[in-house]
Amino acid sequence: MTDGRRPEDVRWMRRALELANGSLYLTSPNPRVGCVIVRDGRVLGEGATQAVGGPHAEVCALRDADARGESVRGATVYVTLEPCSHHGRTPPCADALVAAAPARVVAAMGDPNPRVAGGGFARLRAAGIEVETGVCLDEALALNTGFVARMGRGTPWLWMKIAASLDGRTALRNGRSKWITGEAARADGHHWRARSCAVLTGIGTVLADDPKLDVRYVETLRQPRKIVLDPRLELPLDARLLDGTETLVFTTREDPVRSSQLAGRNARLICLPGPDGRVDLPAMMRWLGEHEVNEVHVEAGERLNGALLRAGVVDELITYLAPVLLGDAVGMARLPVLDDLAQARRFGFFDVQCVGADLRVRARSPAR
Ligand code: AOF
Ligand code: ZN
């Protein structure tokens, strides 16, 4: 093990991270991984994880080297995640690497999947390959926040996207306000939709706006699933979001007739009543984790935003702020009146960027 400070290691790991980033919208529910194989400062092969069921990054890079007529023997392999050691949908990458016999494998992080968790490194070491890990760890973690969360705690990583005025208002009270933020912020919002496994909204938003909830402003080969919280089963069968990828409808009562009607629209009804007669949000998060959802992108109104915050399931806020003031208008999240500032919900800012004429502010819950 080293602290990863060899300059060439960092340089090539950055290239591997770039390759992984190229698969950002594609690999769900698998992590995005990049791999570059190098000898004497020269690239022999490169690759990134393909769509689920397809080859992993290491196998793509080995095939690339092969196609270029390069032998990997004695080379260094840079990979953003520990090579897998298990038979999943594809055979173990650690075995493919052992067969190719590089001298060294440098990883950014271990694989938190309990079926791997150090097994990949152990197999490489047992074959006499030098292994180092921890190079560009933070960048690698950021690429797979959701996968790491699901593997570690069993639930997805959930971010809430909010577009608001500078005074935190999301809509006019008369409903006549579609776009507060500009085109660039909208496209950036679609980038977050595209990387998510599922886009979540509430029945209030569906009935008011009839949103499609698909990815439009960025190119993607995969569309995320959709989730609607619909406690009283009010979702119209001709709702536009029911076109396209599967929709998960979380509700509070069984209804076989509705369930089969929705099945005809590629939607699945899941009944998870909570003690208060609403959908049990922590149970929904566990259900999603069990069904391989890594990252949930919330685009909802103030009621569902408030409920998710009160349930403590929000990991991150992605807030776009337009340089306008709206005064007495709809807020970001409906939360209880506080008696004391000590009761306020606190987040930590960790990224602020200008996006067109607007500001994107990302903040995380302190426990994350
Ligand atoms: C790697 N390289 O590029 C990725 C890995 O069902 P499978 O065979 O596709 O395996 C999925 C698991 O493999 C996934 O849960 C994670 O542990 C690991 N992902 N491993 O060596 C890759 N994407
Ligand atoms: Zn693998």
Image: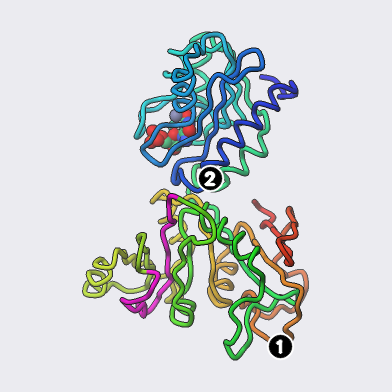
Image point 36% across, 80% down: which residue? 234
On the rendering, which quadrant does ligand 1 occupy?
top left
Question: Position of 356 compared to 224: left or right?
Answer: right
Please identify the residue farthest to the front as the structure is shown: 68
Could you say where residue 98 lies in the image, as x and y percent from the top left?
Answer: 46, 14
Residue in front for this viewpoint, 234 or 184: 184
Q: How many marks?
A: 2
Q: Amino acid at mark 1?
A: Asp
Quadrant of the rendered image containing residue 206: bottom left
The answer to whether the beta carbon of the residue marked 2 is less than 8 Å from any atom of ligand 1 is: no
Q: Amino acid at mark 2?
A: Leu
Magenta stretch: dominant SS?
Answer: loop
Image point 47% across, 24% down: which residue? 64
Q: Which mark is residue 24?
A: 2
Asked if the stretch drawn in magenta spans residue 226, the answer is yes
Stretch of the chain drawn in magenta? 221-241
Q: Dot 1 corresponds to which residue?
A: 328
Image point 36% across, 33% down: which residue? 88
